[in-house]
Image (tube, grey):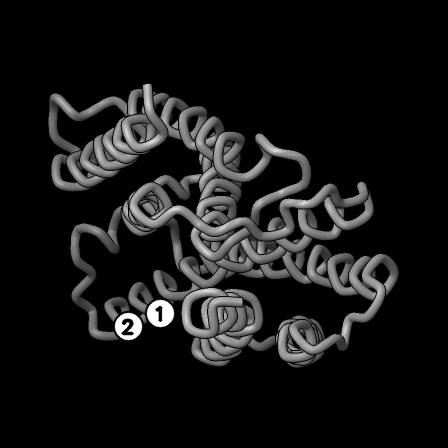
Amino acid sequence: MHHFQFALIAIALYLSATGLIAWRLVRRGQSPSPSRPLALWLILAGLCMHGWLLYDGIFRAPGINLGFFNALVLTSWTVIALFSVSSLTKPVENLGLVLLPVAALTLLLEASFPSPDFMRQAVGWDIKIHVLISMLAYSLLTLASVQAILLAIQDRHLRQRRPAGFIRALPPLQTMESMLFEMIGTGFALLTLALLSGFAFLEDMFAQHLVHKTVLSTLAWLMFGGLLIGRLRYGWRGKTAIVWTLSGFAVLILAYFGSKMVLELILHR
């Protein structure tokens, strides 16, 4: 079976799980209701297929091929993996309505537009560790940004005293906010490790093609750190937390995917 066909199967599994989650929201409190475990099993099956596509596109040859679309697929896999683990213990499966279709889109893009060789030469374990930590940090902060968007929608509907069915299906506002800062705290710690490992393992973090990424990543680190300090010292929450989270995430995405898009898709380097 070809790479594109595997991608289509993974996409179908993710979209089927999305449909089940949406159906559960529509039929909330009614009987019969779609099984939550069935949706989680579909996500797990899609995640396994997604993982094979990662191996085939990124890790099969010596070194790693982290071209633009391959990097998107790796990030989306990490996001879905973290989301799946969280869903086992926390009521966060409704995040799948956003995350799963986006992951399916990254698979479609990667299968349709294969990335040119990038970092295909053999690389040391230290660089691989740096890449892994960076991807985990980006992915966890991506989850935090989606959580912040849902928190903003939930807060708005509650203030207007007209919570819709989707909003009623979310956990209480205080729980959502606590989960947001748990994600940000863990993501911030991983981002700190990613920056430290970059300075330690890369020969020149301020080389021509890394300077923008380094500066913007450091700026995002300062923003997330400032948010956590504001939370601890001044009790920041609500709109303040949402604005800081989304701003830091925007800078972080620009740091990594913005620079890769310019270099690979526009300048063809």
The quarter holding residue 248 reads bottom right
- Residue 3 visible, this orientation: yes
Q: Is residue 196 above or below residue 44?
A: below
- Residue 245 visible, this orientation: no
Which x, y percent locates residue 204?
82, 70
Which x, y percent locates residue 229?
70, 75
> What residue is rendered at 59% in x and 35% in y?
59
Quadrant of the image containing the C terminus: bottom right
Q: Is residue 59 above or below residue 32?
A: below
Seen from the viewer's position, the closer of residues 43 and 120 is 120
Query: Label for residue 212?
Result: none
Q: How many marks?
A: 2
Residue that mark 2 sits on = 156
- The kind of secondary structure element at disc 1 is helix
Q: Is residue 13 left or right of residue 193?
A: left
Q: Residues within 10 Å of mark 2 (few under 14, many from 20)?
A: some
State the separation of the CA atoms marked 2 and 1: 6 Å
The quarter holding residue 1 reads top left
Three-letter residue code for mark 2: Arg
**Marks 2 & 1, CB-CB < 8 Å contact:** yes
Residue that mark 1 sits on = 152
- The kind of secondary structure element at disc 2 is helix
Which x, y percent locates residue 33?
16, 25
Which x, y percent locates residue 109?
32, 49
Three-letter residue code for mark 1: Ala
Q: Is residue 46 left or right of residue 57?
A: left
Q: Is residue 35 left or right of residue 129?
A: left
- Residue furthest right in the image: 200
Seen from the viewer's position, the closer of residues 242 and 128 is 128
> What residue is rendered at 25% in x and 22% in y?
35
